[in-house]
Image (cartoon, rainbow, N blue to C red):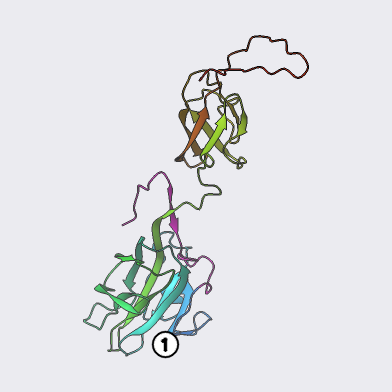
Amino acid sequence: MLRSQCGSCEVQVDLITNGDFSAGNSGFLSNMQYVTGIFTCPLCPENTYTIGTNAVFYHSGFAGTDHTNPPSGSFFIANGMGALGSEVWCQTHNVQPQTDYTFSFWTRDVTNNSNPHPMAQLYASFNGVWSTDSIIATGGWSSFTATWNSGTSTELEVCIINNQWQTGGNDFGLDDISLTACEAIQLAQPAFAGPDLSICSNEIVVLGQPSAFNYNYTWIPDAGIDNPSSAQPNFQWSNASDFDMTMELVVVRDSANVGCIAADTVLIEVRHMPNYVPLQDTVVCHNESAAFTIPSP
């Protein structure tokens, strides 16, 4: 089952390449032998597979068409081998750590025979570890779903395993394979208001960082900011009090296309302006001295 909701800083991805087999025999590996040709029974030998639109074209004893787009869509058609743990289909992908991935596929029996016969028993394998659940390829199309958490892994080999050791009916189809997750968006820029500062009253400083394409910026509060929507505005503040003051400014950064909002804070100490007291003019002759008293601020 696909996740329908992702976080504001996440995007839903499907990592599988050619999961509907519309690109033919490409994008995956298999321990089975790929065969071609129609109406010559290329799937008569066991441990063979092909990509086609109708199973009967490749084996007169088979039946079945594509899961989502019959009769023209393509799917994986197999004559299973009599062995446990056969790797039917595999792909390798880069994954994000600590992320839940949902793997799903559709399967069916393609043996055109109502008599009891062995059927493929399919498992998912994640980096060599089999899923707890499996699915029997019986009757028409049915779906299999398993969830895998990447933990510390950054790469995943995902496989579909056939664990049916009997022949004479171990024949199946695969279609619409997917590996989905809510992955963290790889943002071009983190939120950064700049390093904390200590400045003089009325001194002009530059905050933030150069803007990134398609990002919006808002400074809160905007007191002393010359352009509150700039990623890198000028800041100036007059501190006419008798005390140093610290101002806290927050930049909120939003990637406009995905709504991923982040914020960062800068603390700015604005030192107060000294309180100068003018001295009285004094006339001093040559070789005379005078004393001046400077009052405390």
Task: Provide the major secondary structure of the magenta segment.
Answer: loop
Question: Going 53% across and 17% down the picture, which residue do you hit?
Answer: 295
Q: Residue 97's image quarter?
A: bottom left
State which region is magenta. Answer: 1-27
Amino acid identity at mark 1: Cys
* Residue furthest right as drawn: 286
Give the camera-side residue of 1 and 272. 272
Q: Residue 84's image quarter?
A: bottom left
Please rate how many residues cluster around mark 1, counting C-alpha atoms within 10 Å: few if below 14, some from 14 to 19, many from 20. some
Q: Is residue 110 toward the left or the right of residue 257 in the image? A: left
Res 79 visible:
no
Judged from the image, the secondary structure of the residue bearing numbered disc 1 is loop
Q: Position of residue 207 (x, y in %)?
A: 58, 36
Give the camera-side residue of 266 and 122. 266
Number of marks drawn: 1
Question: Going 61% across and 40% down the picture, which residue do you hit?
Answer: 211
18 up-or-down from 127: above or below: above
Q: Is residue 58 magenta?
A: no
Question: Going 44% across and 65% down the picture, which residue do you hit?
Answer: 95
Res 110 visible:
yes
187 up-or-down from 81: above or below: above
Q: Position of residue 85 (x, y in %)?
A: 32, 85
Q: Which image quarter is the N terminus in?
A: bottom left
Q: Is residue 25 magenta?
A: yes
Q: Is residue 208 toward the left or the right of residue 286 in the image? A: left
Give the camera-side residue of 99 and 283. 283
The residue that disc 1 covers is 44
Q: Residue 292's image quarter?
A: top right
121 up-or-down from 191: above or below: below
Q: Is residue 262 toward the left or the right of residue 118 in the image? A: right
